[in-house]
Image (tube, rainbow, N blue to C red):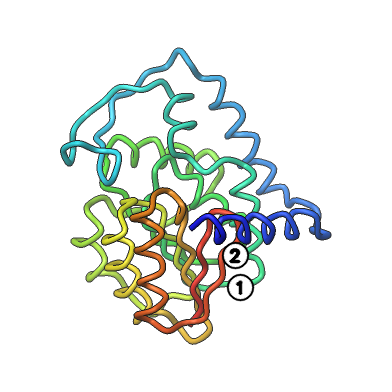
Amino acid sequence: MGGAMIQAGWKYLRWYLSPQPSPSPSLKAVKKLYHRLAQARNFEISIELFGARSQALGQSESFSLAELLQRSASPPWKGALLYSLVRRSSPRYALELGTHMGFGTLYIAAAAPTVEIHTIEASIGLAKIAQRHFRLLGVKPHLHIGLFEDILPRLPAPWDFVYIDGDHRGEALRTYGLFLYERLAPSGQIVCDDIFWSIDMYRGWKELVRMTQGRAEIVGPFGILYK
């Protein structure tokens, strides 16, 4: 895994140093919102936890908005990379697994203003926060509240762009990735976040690539699988 991390770091550095188009007003607005929330240390909220961070599904814990942001929300450097990947693919239909505070959705919407976005979040508390952020920035995704395995079979397909940023377990990544790869449009792609989260996650990513036999690359924290 160490060698893969080094190569992924170099790819990210080459992307970072390459000429980039000027940030759109929408992207600037998302970054501004992130930095504002990073200062919100006195406002606490109780949310339900799911996935790899939770000892028991749906267990509630209290965090300040700043703590919640630092814990899991996509920071601007990662958001800029996601924004770039979405822009180059120009998707019509996008799916996100793991809405959290809504930043992944906002980066996708900023990169493709006409895209139809479906995003799934199991935590009602997080979904309410995300909805406020969507309204604030004028983004109107289809927000589905529930477990991935319950929601996914009911959603339309095929997808042009899929962003997986929830349930950081290797088995979950492999299972959802296989399900969604079959539902990708021609030339579609799946972006898997945090594949170096753990050895288990990295193994799940490698198994996903092997089982789909799709073309894949790793850039920074993202494993990208192409149809």
Q: Position of residue 39 (x, y in %)?
A: 56, 20
Q: Position of residue 149 (x, y in %)?
A: 21, 62
Q: Nearer the viewer, residue 132 or 227?
A: 227
Q: Residue at x 59, y 34 (%)?
A: 33
Q: Residue at x 41, y 69 (%)?
A: 206
Q: Secondary structure at mark 2?
A: helix
Mark number, residue 80: none
Using the image, determine if residue 49 lies above or below residue 1.
above
Q: Residue at x 48, y 24 (%)?
A: 66
Using the image, determine if residue 155 lies above or below residue 198.
below
Mark number, residue 86: 2
Q: Residues within 10 Å of mark 1 (few under 14, many from 20)?
A: some
Q: Nearer the viewer, residue 36 or 98?
A: 98
Q: Quadrant of residue 217?
A: bottom right
Q: Quadrant of residue 81?
A: bottom right
Q: Quadrant of residue 170?
A: bottom left
Q: Nearer the viewer, residue 2 or 95?
A: 2
Q: Secondary structure at mark 1?
A: helix
In the figure, is residue 120 to the left or right of 154? right
Answer whether labels 1 and 2 touch (C-beta < 8 Å): yes
Q: Position of residue 168 (x, y in %)?
A: 34, 51
Mark number, residue 89: 1
Q: Position of residue 29 (x, y in %)?
A: 65, 41
Q: Residue furthest bottom?
A: 186
Q: Residue at x 45, y 56 (%)?
A: 195
Q: Separation of disc 1 and disc 2 at Cα? A: 5 Å
- Type of amino acid under label 1: Ser
